[in-house]
Amino acid sequence: MLNSEEHAVTRRNFVKGGFAGAVATAGTLGAASMFGCTPAEQSASSSAAEEASASSAAEPATSSAVEPAALPQDEIHWSQCNVNCGGNCIFQWHSQDGKVQYMETDNIGDDDLQGRACLRGRSMRRWLNSPDRLLHPMKRVGERGSGQFEEITWDEALQILHDKLQYTIDTWGNQAIYNIYGTGMYATTGRIQKRFLNCIGGCMDQRYDYSTHMLQAIMPYMYGSQFSPYDNVHASSFSEAEANSDLVVMFGNSPAETRMGGANAVWDYAKMREGVMGRGGKIVSIDYRMNESCSGHPEEWLPIRPGTDAALAAALIHEFIVDEKTDEEFLAKYCVGWNEDSMPESAKGKNLSYYDYIMGAGYDMVEKTPEWAAPITQIPADKIRELAKDLENAKAPFVVQGWGSQRHTNGEETARAICMIPIALGKIGLPGTNTGQREAEPPIYLVGSIPGNDADADGNVPEGGVAPGCSILIPVYQWLNAVDHGTEMGVKNAGILDPAGELDDNDGKLKSNIHFIWNYAGNCITNQHGDINKVHEVLTSKPDDELFILVWDTVMTDSAKYADLLLPDAMRSEQMNMQTQGYSEYWTMVTVGTAAQTPPGDCRSCYDVLSDLADLFGKKAEFTQGRTHDEWVQHLYENNGGEAAGITMPNWETIKEQAVFKQAVAPAIGLKAFRDDPEANPLGTPSGKIEIYSEQLAQLNDEWEFENDERIHPIPDFHGGFQGYGSVNDEFPLYCSGFHHKSRTHSSFGFIPELEQVARQQVWINPADAEARGVAMGDKVRVKSPAGEIEIEALVTNRIIPGTIAIPQGAWHNADMTGDKVDKGGCVNTLTTYHPSPYAKGNGPAHSMIAQVTKA
Amino acid sequence: MAQYGFLFDSTRCTGCRTCMLACKDYKDLDQSHAFRKVYDFEGGSVTAAEDGSVTSDVFMYHVSAACNHCANPACLEACPVGAVVKDEGNGLVYINQDVCGGARACVDACPYGVPIYFEDVKKANKCDGCRDRVAAGLRPICVESCPLRALDFGEIEELRAAHPDAVDAIAPLPAGDATGPSLCIIAAATATADAKGVVTNEKTIAGDEAWAS
């Protein structure tokens, strides 16, 4: 065990020991002799000094004193972090002679309301000036995936792009072009390829996202069609809990790792904790790791086996029922499917209600007691009862799930099961409570982005404007299947969404495979998608005339290695830039910034490049609407959303001068309007109520085709899911999950050595599991799953539950793909098996894996 | 003489290392060198029952540590050439790079392991409390960077007066009695001077050798 006495060293020795490596290295050099002092003399003199200091205080060495250097008169430029943590923290660059020197962050006004960049943001200079920056357009010369390219000019690059797009459209139609998910650039003038593609007929696009795939797809069946994981209508803000909650119960939510900036939810979380605990309240953090949000507050951690949250929810609700603490009045008035009384006609008399499932009269005839849940969840039955009592007794329980819980192959049920806790207690829509969803995001976005098309709310497109193109959407995790066998994929077997009926004349199936992938500022071809070895197999099996991949980025990501054409992008800090606040912290803000330094090499603004490309298609006027990039920024700013939100914003000249405008936002209570008046404010479900049992889902389960014994579950019952609970075996005896890590936002920043040094890529393993495998702290180990194998350093820690290992997601894949394919970069998606979830067709395997660990 | 120092709130620190990276950016330090370091400290264990369920008495907290600008700096006393200076105005301790002879006596002497040796210039250097910023009326870069507002800086007696329960050492930092650190720590419940545990990120806080391994 880690904490045995034999490992406990004195603090002084330990701290010194931590630096032994550095001291020893220095000691081998003998460089001090250059200054007329041999190592021996140096040692003697320092001993003498120590003796002297023991007898009397040393004289202040004022002879060496120097005045502190005056701070240089730097140019100040502003921009924001544009990656996908949802934070959009503020950068205050200090530049000299067109080159950034260092960064301050938002230090304007009240300390409480500052968008302070996290460790990654503070490393942005390393990204801007990285030796790995892409500097020139390049075309592939080796095999696809080999990473071999040669430089070409922008003119050549745009001609290739034009010709390949035209060939794709002529041969297969616009549906064969796919705009792949990418989140490395969130700015008002950043992800604008959709506008360009709509100028030439459009492309197939994605629905849902890798963050909330299962939850986003399934929650509308419970909370209605207006549901979004990104609002303050279906979720309450942390500031509401700060003001009014006495118990916060978190499932798989760690703002300290996923929302790290000082404009971000971690600061809201810290204030919330101080508010709740200051009133004598309590926080419970249910997670398979003691995550960083528990730092200094270890008593908050309730360890659980990953992927079993729905079993815990069932046992908690069992206790509510036994203790007669369910709010039957609320359940009858606001919900469908709690018990037989509120079941829809089609499902009456079949013991299909959630109550029957819990009390042992449901399909499995098992009562969901704490004793039933204990071996599944690894939470002792008495702990489950204790948590149930805490929830029953709380005046305002704030139940909140992060997005880790749903990122499992049973995530469609887990997301809803967690919501059942406040639903069963009737603690929804009231002060200090939450809906079971993640903390709310702010309702106000002060500025919009360059639009993907120019249609108005009624679908009318003005003369000379850009019309929306192809409207077909595929679940974000399905693109690889659509490259491989798209024409076999339809609504009922692959979750394809066809809102305009474009596929009606083709039996609902796609009319073409994907033949052109447009990948801007994203790493979801390999690294952030899943099952990298399978991706490699599919992409390298396609002949050149059947697949073309454009990758447009700032550095050579693993996805970029699969490009046929590779374009270099200018960073936002290298051009005029504007963005509002992120989608996760609870305030509103806009920053308008200017270039802190000039773009390196041939890097250009993607707006300028797309304008030129549109010109090749004769569509420049439509694309630009006569505006330059900077004129678009001004246009978007001057058409801001401030007035609609009752906020008076500075005019254009003033914001250019002051750069940052920010304002606090009042707390929000999720589903308050529905709670206050359910008749006037019904949910977008068929019944207008919370649907605990969904008749729609039951119907889809009957209609859809499944490849195996999977099904769609009308109630949020517990089942293990693919490679979930119950699936470990002799070959793969450990559960394995990915998690978000401080050194990266997904894979963004994954190439910065300074970040990797302070937050190393390590697999977390409990001492019990490590000792059984002869693995010690810091050892190199191999982790193998049914999909692949990685090599990674071990972090042997009691901060993870036994029987499960955890791997920080987003590390850069690094394998010899023509050789052993062992990933020395430790990318978790080398281990994930490509197996879309039953309804969402989502990336549940991201956290549902089985694995074995051996010492390397 | 005024004495400036840092305040560190271990009830808020999430171990994010933003302070480290802000410092590295301002001081232009690469992955092998850091003037501020964040320790991950943990103890306790998880025990399994017969039904496979587990109970935990695990504790964990972080310590963000830079130079403590001690009242009696061991580095200053050890330096054979008088390169280490304690500012008479604000008590900040810095190493005059023009005088440092690279003897590394300060590296060996400091109980906190703060001064580090730079092989490229054959000199030691360390956190100087951002004395250039302080002279200009600004706070040290790390303090302004902290997303959790867990760091502060000012006259140490004022910080101590504002936080009467604060201490000057929690594990794994050594006891403060030897050098008189100008450090004011708001201690989390489990963060005590004699907490039994281990630092789990030795490699991230050490220098070149550990980084490469």
Image (cartoon, grey):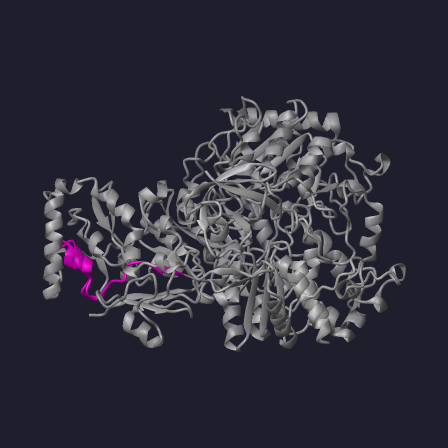
Instruction: Kindly identify the residue that appears in the image at 76 percent across and 43 percent down.
Output: A495
Front residue of this view, candidates A161 and A832: A832
Question: What are the residue bounds of the magenta stretch?
Answer: B62-90
Vertical order, A105 against A566 (above or below): below
Report whether B168 appears left or right of B84.
Answer: right
Residue A716, picture quadrant: bottom right
Residue A514, picture quadrant: top right
Instruction: Return the x and y of residue A435 as percentages of the image width and height.
Output: 67, 65
Instruction: Kindly identify the residue that appears in the image at 77 percent across and 70 percent down.
Output: A331
Instruction: Return the x and y of residue B132 as percentages of the image width and height.
Output: 27, 57
Residue A264 appears in the picture as rendered: no
Residue B195, picture quadrant: bottom left
Instruction: Return the x and y of residue A458 as percentages of the image width and height.
Output: 78, 51
- Numbered label tally: 0
Instruction: Kindly identify the residue that appears in the image at 73 percent across and 76 percent down.
Output: A324
Front residue of this view, candidates A526 and A53: A53
Instruction: Return the x and y of residue A488 as percentages of the image width and height.
Output: 78, 33
Instruction: Kindly identify the residue that appears in the image at 36 percent across and 75 percent down.
Output: B165
Report whether A227 appears left or right of A144.
Answer: right
Residue A396 appears in the picture as rendered: yes
**Magenta span includes A603:** no
**Magenta span includes B89:** yes
Front residue of this view, candidates A329 and A570: A329
Vertical order, B161 against B73 (above or below): below
> Considering the image in quadrants, where does the C terminus of chain A appear?
top left
> Considering the image in quadrants, where does the N terminus of chain A appear?
bottom left
